[in-house]
């Protein structure tokens, strides 16, 4: 597919920004100033000031002599760069590839995008109108090359150059349209070359000898004979889908319909390539310039539309459409291979391989948080709090077997000190005090001695008891150290169901 580019020029970028914050400046000539070599110099002028002969680079005293009523404001450092970056972020609603073109422009790669607005002209007019509504005066053009679009946007009134007509469009433009240095442009004018058509067919060696390699590169880029790369402010994800809206969407059903359509397109592509997403981001671009987004994650690669839609549906209520959403984007930043597993016809699948189980876990994780769902595996340690570890995934296999001994369902993160009354020498406790409450024990079993590995040996051994109180509640207690040593301590370590 032939490339298409849009160049947008913000002729009064910084002065428009000041006008938005001080509306009274809209009808007044005003400039921005900064100190340069001990004198005040104009860095930007609005349209009214330009009509009165004031331009950028002029000394402020000379401008005030020409226009006594001139309003003057201090320029802000790096204001233009920050504004371009912010506007480029806003322009992502029109194309995923947007690059900043300092000092006053933005470049859009619009290949394959304009049909969503019913053609090139409606597409570009929509961009210009919306930027004007936001308070910025812009000049824009669309062409097959970045160089042509840049020149036409600044030196011609034609906003859309037909496909393969970019060379004809360049012919009537001045040399400045090729983005050349001031010295080269001055040299061309001295030679009487005031239009591109006057030198475009000259021998290339002669042009190179007179004007240098940079001149030849710019000319070749404008003609489409040399590629020109863009540096997008955001690298578009390989797996993403876009859905622009003819009318702003402000209702939950409308958002769900848009999400369903994007999921169907994305999952169809993933399924065809035997891929599945592990993370997805749903972005909603509002007409007021703000962006709402929600994201989901899965434990296994998935391209199941219904399951993914249910995960997003849990969070759709958090989207605030305000006056309406004009663009929806669905991205899958994390994608993995997804190969269907062979299933047994007569045997139940069950276990961790059951896709219904993983989808249930996904719903829990996206509703209450990914950190609230855990899977544990046995670890090769005797100490109870070290005898298990958290699994990294559902596919991780056991490296050792679980201990075949009764263990509490709820284990405390760290054992807690308790006061215990117990006979001697190794009888179970009779009662203990826990969190200010005295608990009488009616049943007990133990002791079970647990020691650390011989290469650790960082403390005394533990004698564990399983005990039950009058209400049927069961606890896991242990004594640290020998009873006869008089330095022993009692702890509670867990609760049985």
Image (cartoon, rainbow, N blue to C red):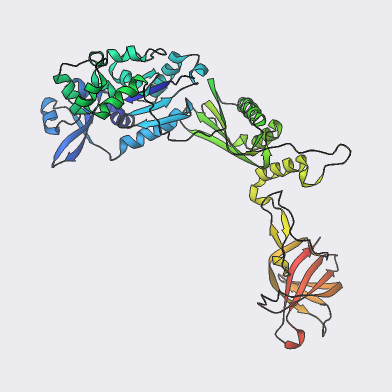
Placement of the C terminus among the 4 image quadrants: bottom right
Q: Is residue 203 left or right of residue 65?
A: right
Q: Is residue 364 left or right of residue 349?
A: left
**Image quadrant assignment for residue 276:** top right
As displayed, is residue 80 above or below residue 27?
Answer: below
In the rendering, at what x and y percent does residue 327 appear? 52, 26
Q: Residue furthest right?
A: 346
Q: Is residue 324 visible?
A: no
As displayed, is residue 229 above or below residue 390?
Answer: above
As displayed, is residue 194 above or below residue 332?
Answer: above
In the rendering, at what x and y percent does residue 411 appear? 73, 63
In the rendering, at what x and y percent does residue 226 appear? 36, 25
* Picture residue at 70% right of the left edge, 35% below the top: 307
Judge by depth and name the residue closer to the eye, 235 or 467. 235
**Image quadrant assignment for residue 455:** bottom right
Q: Is residue 66 left or right of residue 280?
A: left
Judge by depth and name the residue closer to the eye, 157 or 408. 157
For the image shown, how many numbered marks are present on the structure? Answer: 0
* Picture residue at 25% right of the left edge, 37% below the top: 75
In the rendering, at what x and y percent does residue 356 appear? 77, 40
**Image quadrant assignment for residue 295:** top right
Q: Is residue 314 visible?
A: yes
Judge by depth and name the residue closer to the eye, 99 or 462. 99
């Amino acid at each position: 597919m032939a490339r298409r580019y849009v160049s947008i020029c913000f002729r009064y970028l910084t002065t428009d920004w000041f006008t938005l914050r001080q509306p009274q400046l809209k009808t007044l000539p005003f400039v921005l100033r900064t100190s340069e070599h001990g004198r005040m110099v104009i860095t930007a002028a609005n349209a009214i000031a330009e009509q009165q002969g004031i331009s950028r680079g002029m000394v402020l005293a000379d401008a005030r002599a020409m226009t006594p009523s001139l309003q003057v404001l201090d320029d802000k450092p790096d204001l233009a760069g920050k504004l371009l970056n912010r506007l480029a972020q806003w322009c992502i609603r029109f194309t995923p590839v947007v690059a900043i073109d300092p000092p006053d422009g933005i470049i859009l790669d619009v290949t394959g995008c304009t049909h969503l607005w019913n053609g090139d002209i409606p597409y570009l007019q929509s961009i210009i109108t919306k930027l004007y509504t936001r308070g910025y005066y812009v000049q824009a053009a669309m062409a097959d090359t970045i160089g042509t679009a840049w020149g036409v946007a600044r030196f011609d009134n034609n906003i859309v150059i037909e496909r393969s007509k970019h060379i004809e469009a360049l012919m009537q433009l001045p040399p400045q349209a090729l983005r050349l240095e001031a010295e080269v442009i001055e040299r061309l004018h001295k030679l009487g070359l005031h239009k591109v058509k006057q030198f475009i067919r000259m021998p290339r060696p002669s042009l190179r000898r007179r004007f240098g390699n940079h001149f030849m590169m710019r000319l070749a880029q404008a003609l489409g004979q040399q590629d020109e790369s863009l540096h997008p402010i955001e690298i578009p994800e390989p797996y993403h889908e876009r859905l622009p809206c003819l009318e702003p969407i402000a209702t939950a059903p409308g958002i769900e319909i848009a999400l369903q359509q994007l999921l169907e397109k994305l999952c169809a592509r993933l399924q065809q390539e035997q891929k599945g997403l592990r993370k997805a981001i749903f972005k909603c671009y509002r007409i007021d310039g703000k962006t709402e987004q929600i994201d989901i994650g899965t434990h296994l690669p998935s391209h199941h539309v219904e399951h993914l839609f249910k995960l997003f549906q849990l969070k759709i209520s958090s989207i605030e459409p305000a006056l309406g959403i004009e663009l929806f984007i669905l991205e899958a930043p994390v994608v993995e291979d997804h190969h269907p597993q062979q299933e047994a016809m007569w045997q139940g699948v069950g276990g961790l391989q059951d896709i219904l189980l993983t989808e249930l876990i996904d719903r829990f994780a996206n509703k209450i948080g990914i950190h609230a769902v855990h899977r544990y595996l046995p670890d090769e340690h005797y100490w109870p709090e070290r005898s298990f570890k958290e699994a990294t995934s559902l596919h991780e296999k056991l490296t050792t077997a679980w201990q075949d001994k009764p263990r509490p369902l709820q284990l405390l993160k760290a054992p807690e000190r308790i006061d215990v009354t117990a006979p001697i020498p190794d009888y179970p406790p009779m009662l203990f005090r826990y969190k200010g409450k005295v608990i009488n024990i009616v049943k007990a079993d133990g002791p079970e001695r647990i020691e650390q590995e011989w290469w650790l040996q960082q403390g005394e051994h533990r004698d564990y008891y399983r005990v039950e109180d009058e209400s049927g509640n069961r606890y896991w207690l242990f004594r640290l150290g020998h009873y006869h040593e008089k330095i022993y301590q009692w702890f509670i370590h867990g609760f049985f169901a």
